[in-house]
Amino acid sequence: MALPARQDSGLPGLPALRDVCRIFGADPADVRLLHHRSNAVYLLPREDLVVRLAPDTLVRRRRAQTCIEITRWLASQPEPIALPPAPGEQPVIAAGAVATFWPHRPTTPAPSLADLAVPLRRLHALPAPAFPVPRYQPLQRLFEAVTLDQQRPHPAVADDHRAWLLDRAHTLIDTFTTTSFPLGEGLVHADAHSENLVRDPDHGTWLLIDWDGTCLGPRELDLLTGIPDHFHEPEADRTRFLTAYGYNILDWPGWTLLRDITELHALGAYIRLAPSKPAAAGELHHRIRSLRAGDRSARWHAIP
């Protein structure tokens, strides 16, 4: 029986993994942790499955359900775009966790940024599905994380930083609501980068994974990996990606708005993880300081 939806965002651990595997009928022996950021992601080597675990909150339940529905729908399209979920009743909700199960697919050789353009072009050409899909809500995850942090005995974000983040977030949202987007709105992945690609063994092409944030929103959201940011991707790689997609977002003056929204959005995972992960706490404070100072030269690093 599923537990009541939790209000905190601590990531589920191995006890929850064993429970959801038992319900789904998968063997958790020799499990290996792959990622521990917005989700706890485990490899089940005996099943050749990947399990994504999120805390059991109402928001995470909705995201997981949408993720399963979208990827199954995309799998029915003429051209492959997304990795479909493993067969079976999903998502699985138990032991304070929301779990989804996926086939394990190789990522070698590693994809390039240009490889990302093909599935995104195909995605953006599709009509919206017949079932409900949430609309893009800028900075929703940041607000959720800040609210969680304020309820902690020892918040990870200092009061002055929190006040700045919230003021900046509301300013960006006000600008977003009055902005027109050249590519229009449609179904978007909303976390499109080369780490979210796996190889399709049947066709030799690349498929998108991690559809937790999929929604109806400006298509430009999926092109942000092609803009200058704090990760300092090589300009030549960004140019090849935008050329392969067929639209240069940098020719649109509004691109900095989406960059700024995305950079604030990315703080949410680090706010949630900061109390239990010193590296995440250090990166969080580094990012906030660079944003407040307007230091575009500061290099950010993803914490696994």
Image (cartoon, rainbow, N blue to C red):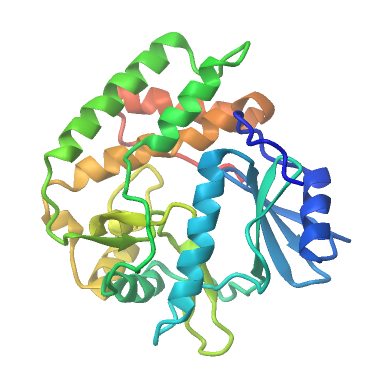
Picture coordinates of residue 76 (x, y %)? Answer: 45, 81
Whether residue 206 is visible: yes
Picture coordinates of residue 27 (x, y %)? Answer: 85, 65
Q: Is residue 170 left or right of residue 189?
A: left
* Rendering quarter of residue 58: top right
Q: Give above or below for 231 relative to 152.
A: below
| View extreme (front): residue | 1
* Residue in the image at 18% along x and 31% along y: 174
Q: Nearer the viewer, residue 199 or 279?
A: 199
State how many labels appear.
Answer: 0
Q: Is residue 37 left or right of residue 293?
A: right
Picture coordinates of residue 266 (x, y %)? Answer: 43, 39
* Residue in the image at 80% along x and 68% along y: 45
Q: Nearer the viewer, residue 225 or 72?
A: 72
* Rendering quarter of residue 38: top right
Whether residue 210 is visible: no
* Residue in the image at 63% along x and 74% along y: 105
Q: Is residue 262 left or right of residue 183?
A: right
Q: Nearer the viewer, residue 170 or 156?
A: 170
Q: Give above or below for 80 relative to 163.
A: below
Picture coordinates of residue 42 (x, y %)? Answer: 72, 56
* Rendering quarter of residue 97: top right
Q: Give above or below for 87 relative to 44.
A: below
| View extreme (right): residue | 29
* Residue in the image at 55% along x and 73% along y: 84
